Amino acid sequence: MAVDEVHAASGLLELRIKAIEPVAPAPSALEPVESPGRLVDPAIETLVTDIFSELLGEKIDASTPFFDVGATSLTLVLAHRRLSTAVASDDFTVIDLFANPTVASLAAFLSENAHAGTRAAPPPAEHTSR
């Protein structure tokens, strides 16, 4: 809600409240990223499937969104911790799990990042002589 201040002729302050229409997030932020045509490392897909199956207590299909089979935000945080350790990536965030909400799309995302080497190499150490 927004508040408009209106000064009435009597000198009193009137506050008028008006509703603000919610702004929908960009569709790309909510739409799942599917993996047709993307290269998927079978080891990474198995890893993602195993982690989510263990966290959810049931085997999940590669194309079923995590939230449709009972995942919560906490589930994604726990999965992120395990996956980050397994793929050794500092660039992989929890937001990537929301953007890639299926085993197939997440495995494709992780595979692409693993093969693309998304992390920049550290700059060479400078040696100075004293």
Image (cartoon, grey):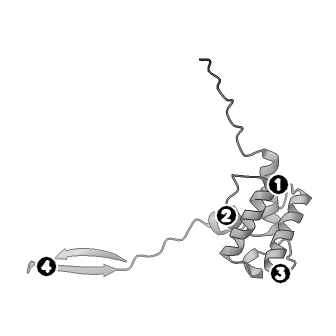
Q: Residues within 10 Å of mark 4 (few under 14, many from 20)?
A: few
Residue at 66%, 74% (x, y): give it. 73
Q: Is residue 121 left or right of residue 130?
A: right
Q: Label 1 belongs to which residue?
A: 111
Mark 1 against mark 2, which lies toward the viewer?
A: 2
Mark 2 against mark 3, which lies toward the viewer?
A: 3
What label does residue 60 carry, if any? none
Could you tell me how far apart the alpha carbons at marks 2 and 3 are, in whole angstroms?
21 Å
Picture coordinates of residue 32 (x, y %)?
72, 68
Q: Is residue 126 above or below residue 35?
A: above
Q: Residue furthest front?
A: 130
Q: Earlier in the sequence, mark 2 or mark 3?
A: 3
Question: Mark 2: which amino acid?
Answer: Val
Mark 1 against mark 3, which lies toward the viewer?
A: 3
What label does residue 94 carry, if any? 2
Question: Mark 3: which amino acid?
Answer: Gly
Question: Mark 4: which amino acid?
Answer: Ala
Assess whether mark 3 and mark 1 are in contact (beta carbons under 8 angstroms): no
Could you tell me how far apart the alpha carbons at marks 4 and 2 are, in whole angstroms?
51 Å
Picture coordinates of residue 74 (x, y %)?
67, 74
Mark 4 against mark 1, which lies toward the viewer?
A: 1
Q: Label 3 belongs to which residue?
A: 57
* Image quarter of residue 95: bottom right
Regarding mark 3 in the picture, which secondary structure is present there? loop
Nearer to us in this view, 103 or 53:
53
Could you tell me how far apart the alpha carbons at marks 1 and 3 are, in whole angstroms?
25 Å
Picture coordinates of residue 13 (x, y %)?
16, 78
Q: Is residue 22 left or right of residue 40?
A: left
Q: Earlier in the sequence, mark 4 or mark 2?
A: 4
* Image quarter of residue 76: bottom right
Residue at 75%, 75% (x, y): give it. 66
